[in-house]
Image (cartoon, rainbow, N blue to C red):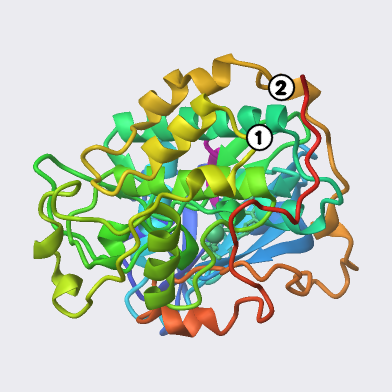
Amino acid sequence: MSSLGANNSNSATSTTNNNEESKTTIYSMLTDQPITIPDSCLFGICRPVSEFEKLNCIGKGTYGVVYRGRDKISQEIVALKKVRMENEQWGLPISSMREINLLLNLRHENIVELREVAVGKSLRSIFLVMTYCEQDLASLLDNMSQPFTEAQVKCIGLQLFRGLNYAHKRFIVHRDIKVSNLLLTDHGYLKIADFGLARQFTLPNGSMTPMVVTLWYRAPELLFGSKYQTTAIDIWSAGCVLGELLCHRPLLPGRSEIQQIDLIIEMFGTPTEKIWPGLNDLPSLKHFSLRQQPYNNVKQTFPWLTNAGLRLINFMFMYDPCKRATAEDCLRSSYFKEAPLPCENDLMPSFPQHRNQISSSSNQPRPALSARLSSSSNEPTSAVNDSRKRQNLPPLRVGCTNVKRTRKS
Ligand SMILES: Nc1ncnc2c1ncn2[C@@H]1O[C@H](COP(=O)(O)OP(=O)(O)OP(=O)(O)O)[C@@H](O)[C@H]1O
Ligand SMILES: [Mg+2]
């Protein structure tokens, strides 16, 4: 990012290839004249994005467009996430700054690898170059004819908890765990992606905006307006992902915040001050009166699940964030030690690459098969997102009878 940090903020950048002294030239946006940056002002050099060939668009999110690309030098296939600068007057958006900063310091086999940042000629043209993953779980779930087996779900779940455990131990909370932010390689490796909303937190925890996490995966403390977020919000979201993989459909697909709370209450019963001390002090509970529903319907929702599986689900969905499972607790769960045992990564199936079945000339993302929310996190109201959801999606009812499940003995 050196050239971006150069001392002329009104400039576009480009690297001079033929300059033996490896100086960098920037072009003034005011005069269009080249200015050479002295070596002493450089902290490193971003490669020009022209060294990558764009193959096709594989995703369009809130913060950027993602392309499959080829590194012309190494011939490797990579993912190029173009930072969306549409409304940015003051340079790189904060979400991208955070994503770059955090990802460059995170190295784990279950977290997407940010290799470098590449730049185009204009200051508005910035790309995150990441290791390419063949699938994301959202488009995969939309296109799979057969649901994952329980052994495969355990393999994915364990990898998700390992990635989260690594990030949480470094005081990083992801704040947007959902199936479209979980990538899968053809070798069966799950990678947590999209750290655009992630934050490093301090202890004691400072206040943060509660408008994070896509609605279906949003923890109740956020829905009730708590400004104090802990890693427990990622665990709630991970529980929603695990439930979605087991049921092969979204677990709590609310269409509005009110309905989201309603679905949560239907599944887990009404929270009380007794099981969640401090509940009545949460800001939104001044405006809501909660529907009374005394039952926990987890067992009815997952009738095939063993006691260990049910215990894990209930632990991940504890209302009180202080009592909710940690990623480490999840990794230790006996659910992963009983039959069917988690499948090995290299025994995970590989799948057709649906996202690449588009003409590269059109360079457009695949039309949204998925009705999953792309993100609600940075939008002022979740109602905006809700209009993008699958219109005919009935709420999940107990039993998940829509999925024929084959159990491994
Ligand atoms: N390294 C990668 N390999 C393959 N595909 C990727 C990679 N990174 C991102 N994608 C694809 O691009 C999509 C959007 O990427 P990402 O979630 O990082 O962007 P975003 O703008 O923050 O999205 P959103 O706001 O919708 O969550 C992902 O859902 C995934 O399909
Ligand atoms: Mg995303």
Front residue of 155 and 358: 155
Q: Dot 1: what SS? A: helix
In the image, residue 114 lies in the stretch drawn in magenta? yes
Residue 96 is situated, as x and y percent measured from the top left of the image, at 42, 60
Q: Which residue: 66% across, 21% down?
A: 342
Answer with the quarter of the image where residue 245 lies: top right
Horizontal placement of 137 versus 99: left or right? Answer: right
Front residue of 225 and 192: 225
Q: Is residue 369 visible?
A: yes
| Distance (Cα) linking label 1 and label 2 | 8 Å
Residue range in magenta is: 110-117
Q: Which residue: 56% across, 52% down?
A: 181
Q: Amino acid at mark 1?
A: Val
The residue at which mark 2 appears reads as 343
Q: Which residue: 13% across, 76% down?
A: 286
Q: Dot 2: what SS? A: loop
In the image, residue 97 lies in the stretch drawn in magenta? no
Label ID, residue 153? 1
Front residue of 60 and 256: 256
Residue at the outermost top position: 337
Q: Amino acid at mark 2?
A: Cys
Earlier along the polypeptide chain: callout 1 or callout 2? Answer: 1
Q: Residues within 10 Å of mark 2 (few under 14, many from 20)?
A: some
